[in-house]
Amino acid sequence: MLAQLKTFLMRGSILELAVGVIIGAAFGKIVSALVDKILMPLIGVAMGGINFQSLSVKIVGVEIGYGAFIQAIFDFTLIGVTLFLLLRAAGKNPGPPPAITTEELLTEIRDLLKEQQAK
């Protein structure tokens, strides 16, 4: 079982995924800082100094902080737009990958079958 675990963990796709997650987390911090420290203050000034975090209402003695929810929606939207624009500027098309043709798929299947027969 340990040998299988080692084989599983050392496969290239698992290592690439781990690197992607780590880099994604670091990139997420960069984008979050951009949104929190640069874009949101500018949007707050443009909207007359509104601080969404402080918006709340009391219902039956319980304070409902709906402003934090609105802020989270703004953050999500701005982070999505920012990532889209950064990827677009970097030349990475965030759209769907190109469709594979039937001919390419059949060629790939043939090659895989040849590899299996060779083993």
Image (tube, rainbow, N blue to C red):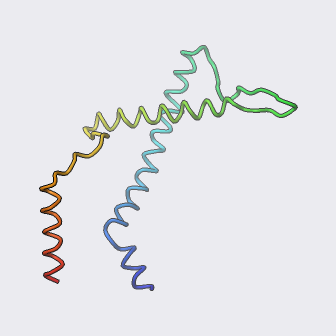
Total numbered badges shown on the rendered structure = 0
* Residue plotted at (40% across, 62% down): 18
Which residue occupies the foreground of this view, 77 or 87? 77
Q: Is residue 16 above or below residue 90?
A: below
Q: Position of residue 34 (x, y in %)?
A: 47, 34
User: Which corner quadrant holds the C terminus?
Assistant: bottom left
Q: State which quarter of the image contains the N terminus.
A: bottom left
* Depicted 119 relative to depicted 51: above or below: below
Left or right of residue 55: residue 26: left
Quarter where residue 57 is shown: top right
Residue at 30% in and 35% down: 88
Q: Is residue 21 above or below residue 79?
A: below
Q: Is residue 45 left or right of residue 60?
A: left
Q: Quarter of the image holding residue 104?
A: bottom left
**Residue at the spot x=16%, y=73% of the render?**
113
Q: How far across and down, in percent of the image, does residue 3 sit?
A: 40, 85
Residue at horizontal 72%, vertical 32%? 65
Residue 13: give x, y in percent of width and height: 33, 65
Position above or below: 24 against 36: below
Q: Is residue 24 left or right of residue 116?
A: right
Where is residue 61? Give x, y as percent: 87, 32
